[in-house]
Amino acid sequence: MSAASRAPLRSNRSTRTTLSTRVRRRAALTAGAAVAALLVTGCGSGGTSGGGGNTNFVTGTDGTATVAKGERTPAPDLSGKTIAGKTLDVADYKGKVVVLNVWGSWCNPCRAEAKYFAKVSKEYAGKGVQFVGINTRDTSTGAALAFEKDWDITYPSLYDPTGKLLLRFDKGTLNPQAIPSTLILDREGKIAARSLSALSEERLLKMLKPVVAEK
């Protein structure tokens, strides 16, 4: 085969490589934009209620949204490494009520509510309740670990610096849309309640107790 006849083959391979690179870059940018859109509210004392379509949830005057037992949707796969480097899968806690708290060490409202989460998590540890954090937008685990030490938080937190775990929640469900956000999962792993703002001990217990009382 002559050099002239081989030249188009090299050109085609080069074109395919360029197109493949562009597709990968476009996919990465799309994912990044989706994460940014999800967390657009950043860290604040409140958030948006979201929803739309057949959401089946009711938002109370305090901003807490709840769903009747027969109308709840399952939480997505929430598994990965914790900030301590251990493997964790929230599905392993099925049979318990799970309190999911989305937080960041850089977030002032997260610090404001941390003492309440630390206290209630200990009080309910023997009552079939498991607390799990989802740490997000911390560029390293060092600050997150220091946060837990400062506030005496003993329950595990998944490390989700880019928000990929948060994107697994379906739109129109009680998905976390702000930092901090708190979700209560019932014993079947379904989303029973959500808050998009920092919680006092009173509001946290108001979310938690009705789900714990369910039979």
Image (spheres, rainbow, N blue to C red):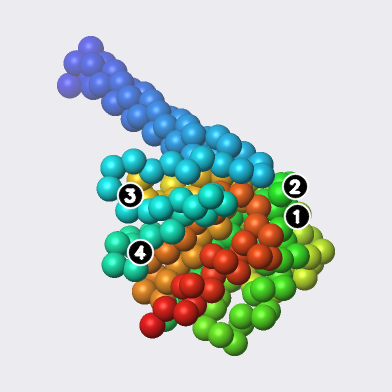
Task: Estimate the x, y position of residue 193 in percent, counting from the top left.
Answer: 46, 60
Left or right side of 211 for 144: right
Q: Secondary structure at mark 1?
A: helix
Q: Secondary structure at mark 3?
A: loop
Task: Give the residue type at disc 4.
Answer: Ala
> Residues under labels 1 and 3: Cα distance?
30 Å
Query: Which residue occupies the extreme right position in the image?
Result: 150
In the image, residue 179 sits, relative to residue 40, either above or below, namely below
Mark 1 and mark 3 lie on one chain; the one further toward the N terminus is 3
Q: Nearer the viewer, mark 3 or mark 2?
A: 3
Say which residue label 2 marks: 108
Query: Which residue occupies the extreme bottom position in the image?
Result: 126
> Residues under labels 3 and 4: Cα distance?
11 Å
Q: Where residue 68 is drawn, which disc sits there? A: 4
Q: Nearer the viewer, mark 1 or mark 4?
A: 4
Residue at the spot 59% in from the left edge and 87% down from the top edge? 126
> Residues under labels 3 and 2: Cα distance?
30 Å
In the image, residue 40 sits, relative to residue 102, either above or below, namely above
> Residues under labels 2 and 1: Cα distance?
6 Å
CB under 8 Å between discs 3 and 2? no
Say which residue label 3 marks: 55
Task: Give the residue type at disc 3.
Answer: Thr
Q: Where residue 112 is drawn, which disc sits there? A: 1
